[in-house]
Amino acid sequence: MRPGPRTASGPRCGAGARATRLRPATDTHRGTLTVALTELKGQNTGTTTVVIERGPVRVFAGALLDDDPAYRQDEPGGPVPPTFPFVMPFWGSLGTGGAAGLPVEKLRGPGRAILHGEQEFVYTRMPRVGDVLEGTTTITDVYEKERSNGGKMEFYVSETDWRDAKTGDPVVKTVFTMIVNVRPPKQD
């Protein structure tokens, strides 16, 4: 393993489409003007504390069809798959309030489909079974791309800075892009 930051990212979506900053958009189902979610940019959406447990690591590795025995160790300190930080907020969160992240309830609605766009991981060190991490999520970008059929795709980029809960040392930064596919207005 190389020392220093490492990255892993998924495929890019929407290549070739024209990007613009979000602006007010007409809600085709209610005929009213809705304010796009640009007010989210720069917003801290909360902090989540997680304990990385070996059971979820085993199940996650199995879901990836990864049969590496390192992910099935019984002792603390075992490795986790490189993309495990993506599921940490949903699988291991402590306390009330659930996982910090994008306010998905504000993105839903008629004619709107939520898609997983891209994920990226920048490692200072690899997380390990037994780690207790605190992740603070910030929405870093909001933009849209027009589609050729008259619809649009809204992009919401969030970054979560995961740190060791005891020392405050950085562990991994996750970058996640959520896409909302918005149907074009109905033609009369």
Image (tube, rainbow, N blue to C red):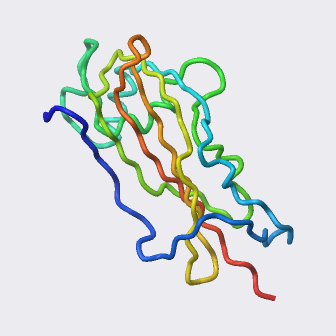
Q: Quadrant of residue 84?
A: top left
Which residue is at 44% across, 18% downward? 51
Image quadrant containing the N terminus? top left
Which residue is at 38% across, 12% downward? 167
Which residue is at 81% across, 88% downward? 188
Q: Nearer the viewer, residue 26 or 50?
A: 26
Report x, y in % for residue 165: 44, 15
**Position of 41 relative to 30 (above/below):** above
Which residue is at 18% across, 28% downward? 69
Report x, y in % for residue 58: 32, 28
Report x, y in % for residue 168: 41, 17
**Position of 139 relative to 125 (above/below):** below
Q: Quadrant of residue 163?
A: top left
Report x, y in % for residue 136: 52, 30
Count the marks: how many?
A: 0
Residue farthest to the left, as pictured: 1
Relative horizontal placement of residue 79, taking residue 89 as reference (left or right): left
